[in-house]
Amino acid sequence: MTTIIQPSTKPTLRAWLTADVTTSPRQARLQRAYFGWRRLSGNHLTMFGLSVLLFLVMVAVLAPVLAPQGYDAQSLTDRLAAPSAAHWFGTDDLGRDVLARMVYGTRVTLMIACLVAVIAAPLGLLIGTTSGYFGGWVDIVLMRINDVFLSFPGLILALGFVAALGPGIRNAVIAIALTAWPPIARLARAETLTLRNADYIAAVRIQGASPLRIILRHIVPMCLSSVIVRITLNMAGIILTAAALGFLGLGAQPPMPEWGSMLAVGRAHLSGAWWVSTVPGLAILVTSLAFNLLGDGLRDVLDPRSDT
Amino acid sequence: MRLSVLKALARQAGSVATTLLGLLALTFFMGRMLPTDPVLAIVGDQADQATHDMVYHQLGLDKPLYMQFFLYIRSMLSGDFGNALFTGHRVADDLMKVFPATVELATFAIIIGVGVGVPLGVLAAVYRGSIIDHVARVVGLLGYSTPSFWLGLMGLILFYATLGWVGGPGRLDVAYMDSIDTHTGFTTIDALLDGDMDVFWNAVRHIVLPASILGYTSMAYISRMTRSFMLEQMAQEYMVAARVKGLSGWAVIRRHAFRNILVQLVTVIALAYAFLLEGAVLTETVFAWPGFGHYLVSGLLAGDMNAVLACVLLVGIIFIGLNLLTDVLYRLLDPRTR
Amino acid sequence: MTAQLIVEDLRVRFSTAHRVIDAVRGVSFTVGREKVGIVGESGSGKSMTARAILKLTPPQAKLAAKTLRFQEIDLAAATERQMLKVRGRRISMIMQDPKFALDPVMRVGDQIAEAIPADRRGSRAQDRERVLGMLDSVQIRDPKRVFELYPHEVSGGMGQRIMIAMMLMPEPSLLIADEPTSALDVTVRLRVLAILDELAAQRHLGLIFISHDLNLVASFCDRVLIMYAGRIVEQCAASELAHAKHPYTRGLLASLPRVGDTRGRLPVLTRDPAWLSS
């Protein structure tokens, strides 16, 4: 009598994710995400960028813990003190601890980045897909507007809007968002143009889907990956623009600890207290660099056909 | 000229005109977005109603919006940008005075950008994957990530305050100011024209650092594009054919690959020059360089909308103009499109 | 017939991080002042063999051979500097598609003139005369006008004749033709081949003719080499092709349509994995 030996069929997560044949759309989607993640994590530079960003998020969230004295604790007797054990990054011209201001400044920077992305990306997506899908006059008008916005380098346009709206962090965010949507719209439109004539779009249209539904449910998801890549790459420029506005005194107003404005404060004390300017600038550099590295890595994974 | 070429040109002129119109509309709109009352800015808050009304009428604010826009276009196109409140002069006159300083800075910057960027890009492509390639990549990446105003400040600390290798802010040392006549508005050229070598070298010492900082971003962009173009050409069949003829590796790069990227490279350089206007705003602020960017920022901080809008409009026009120029250049230089 | 080119056990290998690809696995043959055809499908290694002879394989390829010799030169041991004297002057190669093999931003005449070896150059006018003479020998009717043209302004057949002119300019003794007519219309093909034939005879050239077209090679060449998966599986005289022994060759011959064919269906070549290790 033969004994039939059953091999252990306890399914592991790994086996499920690497199975050759998928049995559900969810499994297929998760498999794609898993392989994408594997490729992303293989790129060391990208991982460095990602970890820097995660570190910054952590710092921003834990700000009250890391700098319990707050960002505005002045001490006029302790002005422009060099870096020491008490003040790791020294103090600024009002005696405030630079490290504390840096930590809270992380919140400001990340908030600006998020807000701009949240405003510019959907706006650009909507305008680009609408323009690409409908074509004709809608396309011509929207793209002409797009061209007008693209005729200005980002900072100049932002300066124009800030001049019109007035200084302050809210207006700075609006101004920067207004400069960030045109490239996204252009990209979304290009993608829509290639998708517009696809058979499955025609099929959905015959089934009676309204243009809004077609755009939102069928076209936008296809554009998402390249838009994500582009906004991540552009984020470096957005942060630099925000810092530039802060430096010029047009962004966050005192006493808010924005890195760019901290740099401007240190300008008057360059030869004596160099740390007041150096440290915020390094933070801006590292944040920008992290976004660039992450964006490069994402592009390799999500959008490999674009040239390096 | 062939009809098709004329039609293409007409179409392009039409699109440029509409973009220009859109530009004017945008700046007009920006001017009207003001939360502050422009009349108050002129008459102050002590003025009585009659003065207020008079200035209101003078500024044309009582006319319908489309009329205001039409008047706005007319004055912009005729070069009447209004008066700059913070300098007291006509904006147009101010701009003529400050522009040469920026052009001088930008030209030095682009020379540095091209002079370093192109060879770096070529080497990075030829020695792909080597240490040179990695260095070029890192330099390029940093170029996109570094805040130029911070780099300028660090440069001043290091090269001016500590080492004393370069001059400080401004175009010349205070001692040399007004010691040469203004011929072109370019301090370096004017000094040479006057034969005053002391002033010339002083001007060079002052322009070196800001031009390098300004040129750094364009250098990163140019080297990256050069590398990409070169790699594209090096994969082409005609490169192998050229080597079959007995040409050495570098001769092939020089005579064939490089010549093939020239057209694209010229358009890239023109674009980089346009972006220098943006960098100039920050660099001129850091180095107190009396150019266009400095003027824009000063006007902004003083709340002078005339000056600011004129500057913004001008940048837009220059940008469109440079884009048009690159299109034309491309068509002229590439034998395949003639 | 004395052999000009002696190839013995030539190997070309590509190693990447994941796998190793042997494009050419131990190819041996000789070429004298005769027309030798190399026939094979895509991926058989025929183009790579040609590149290996000129040492123009891609940088990541590794070349090895027991013997790789052209006349008195040891190609295998030659440095890049020495190869510069071999390419063009001793061995030359015409490539498949003149659209891609000619520099698009350089005038055709200048490209041909570039092929004149440095030590044989004269004044600009003298070089120009030589180029015009060469254009004439490939039966281009208006050489002066063609000299000034750009590659995108000439037709396929003319482009290929320009390439022949360009590659014969330095007066080599061995010419490799890598699929010279594959990109041309059928009507133009014969004309270009006729020019090639005539020039090869005139100059006593050795010719290696690479193609995937068995019929073409059989009618044009003196000897035929059949390549499969990086190896030579058959070598015979063109006239003896019908008596070929290797099953791959027989399979190729059988699948060719013939006028007056009585077969109802053309047999499809079945590949025997044993051929990979013959």
Image (spheres, coloured by chain):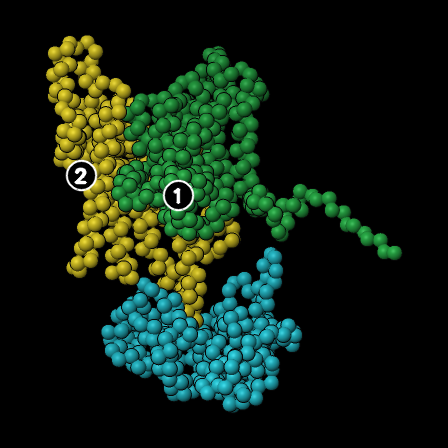
Chain colours: A green, B yellow, C cyan
**Residue plotted at (24% across, 41% down):** B19
Residue at image point 59% right, 67% down: C22
Q: Please tell me which residue is depicted at 43% across the width and 36% down the height of the picture.
A: A235
The local secondary structure at tag 2 comes to loop
Q: Which residue is mark 2?
A: B183
Report if residue B16 is visible in the image.
Answer: yes
1 or 2: mark nearer the eye: 1
Please state the chain letter of the residue tagged with numbered disc 2 in the rendered image: B
Q: Nearer the viewer, residue C120 or C236?
A: C236
Residue C76 image position (x, y, % from top left): 56, 73
Residue at far right of view: A1
Chain bearing tag 1 is A
Under circle 1, the secondary element is loop
Residue B173, numbered label: none
Crowding around mark 1 (Cα neighbors within 10 Å: few <14, some 14 to 19, many 20+) is: few
Distance in Å between CA atoms under marks 1 and 2: 71 Å
Q: Are the numbered discs 1 and 2 placed on the same chain, yes or no? A: no
Q: Quadrant of residue B199?
A: top left
Judge by depth and name the residue closer to the eye, A98 or A85: A98
**Residue A247 occupies quadrant:** top left
Q: Picture coordinates of residue B103 (x, y %)? A: 26, 39
Of residues C174 and A208, the one nearer the viewer is A208
Q: Is residue B157 visible?
A: no
| Residue designated by label 1 | A208
Quarter holding residue A245: top left
In the displayed structure image, the side of residue B113 where residue C126 appears, left or right: left
The C terminus of chain B sits in image quarter: bottom left
Q: Amino acid at mark 1?
A: Gly
